[in-house]
Image (cartoon, grey):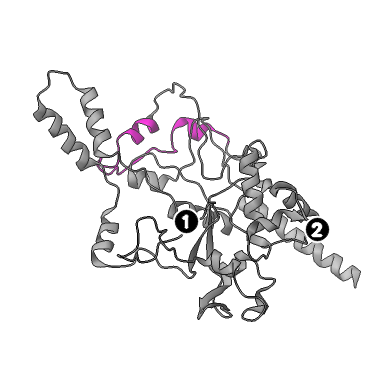
Amino acid sequence: MPKIFPKRNDPYLNLHNVTQILGWQANVDFSPLTSIKGVLSYIAKYCSKTEKKSEDYHQIFNTILTSLDVEAPSRVVYQKLLSSLIIERDWSAQECCHLLLGCPLHKTSRQFRSLNLSWPRFNAFQSLDPLMNNDDLAPTEMNWIDRYEWRNIQDVNPELADVSLLQIFRRYNFRNGKFVLRPRAKPRVVIVWPGYIPDKSDPAMYENWCHAKLQLHHPYTGDVETLQWIDGEDIGWAAAYANCLSTCGGHDDDPLANEEDLDDDDEDEEFEEPEEEEIPREMRDWHELANRGPMTQFIQHSRLGRHDLDRDFDWHHNYMTFEDIRHQEAGLRTNRRHREVISH
């Protein structure tokens, strides 16, 4: 994904926008987005970002006790406890307002459904009979995975013989004892968990990942363990997945991580700032301007970008202007038209 790296005459100068900095009167980073993918990634990151939760009362109380002198009166302890509870906030004012008024917190064009592939499987309990014995097992509800595994592909749902579990969760409803296709509805967004990763250095994790991959994409009935049987032999989940890669033509995309994703861990994410060692920096005038904070008085006249260091810097050395780019684009279009005329 392309990124913009404008010239700068200070190695510690962040990307910034002069109007934004003078309006906020504080240090504000500025990163231009260069593609629609970058915009969507930026929005998705902050929509799904979870805030750091505050500590529980017990932890806060212990932290306060360890920071005070043993002879401090109890009144001081409780004052600090109340102060800590007031400044901590797990929900914003807007979220609290929406919850109190019964307003939806979000609107989406897709439906979401959770798919838990962990084992053993835990299903919801049915209503308990008050007359049942203490030694009796409580009955449980069948979830969608149970209904998928025990679907009747002979008489009731013969068309589901080649439909995978992931396709059922995305494109079907369960009505009147059978799965029914949603022909006009958009596919659901399926949230698969646990989030297994294909880490071959952890054999147990890799086996679970192979298990989840096969269960998501290979149609089966009855016991899911049959997916690791090849020619009547139990070869294990990793070997069964390797056999799948060599014999299957491909599968639908799923939310689980792919093996290719682990190869990109060394690359920095576009919106993540790399951790750097703290380097002593010389305080300059723009540092002092940023340190004033957002509550300072409005600056009528600013020298930001107009200092002698900025004026003396050769900004146009080996620099291509937009006019130069337009001339090059026009030349490319002219050459393309000449080639098309010659070819005809």
- Residue 120: x, y in percent? 53, 52
* Label total for image: 2
Judged by depth in the image, the label closer to the viewer, 2 or 1, is 1
Depth order, front residue of 181/39 = 181
Q: Residue drawn 38% across and 37% down? A: 303
Q: How crowded is mark 1: few (under 14 residues within 10 Å), some or many (20 or more)?
A: few
Examine the residues drawn in magenta and state their main secondary structure: loop
**Among numbered discs 2 and 1, the one appearing first in the sequence:** 1
Q: Residue 57 carries which label?
A: none
Magenta region: 286-314
Indicate the quadrant where residue 108 lies: bottom left
Depth order, front residue of 42/262 = 262
The amino acid type, in three-letter code, at marker 1 is Phe
The amino acid type, in three-letter code, at marker 2 is Thr
Q: How far apart are marks 2 and 1 (CA)?
A: 33 Å
Q: Secondary structure beneath disc 2? A: helix
- Can residue 86 be seen here? The reply is yes
Depth order, front residue of 91/304 = 91
Q: Secondary structure beneath disc 1? A: loop
* Left or right of 129 on screen, residue 29: right
- Residue 112: x, y in percent? 48, 65
Q: Residues within 10 Å of mark 2 (few under 14, many from 20)?
A: few
Q: Residue 122 carries which label?
A: 1
Q: Is 150 rendered above or below residue 291? A: below
Give the labeled residue for mark 2: 247
Q: Residue drawn 38% across and 31% down? A: 287
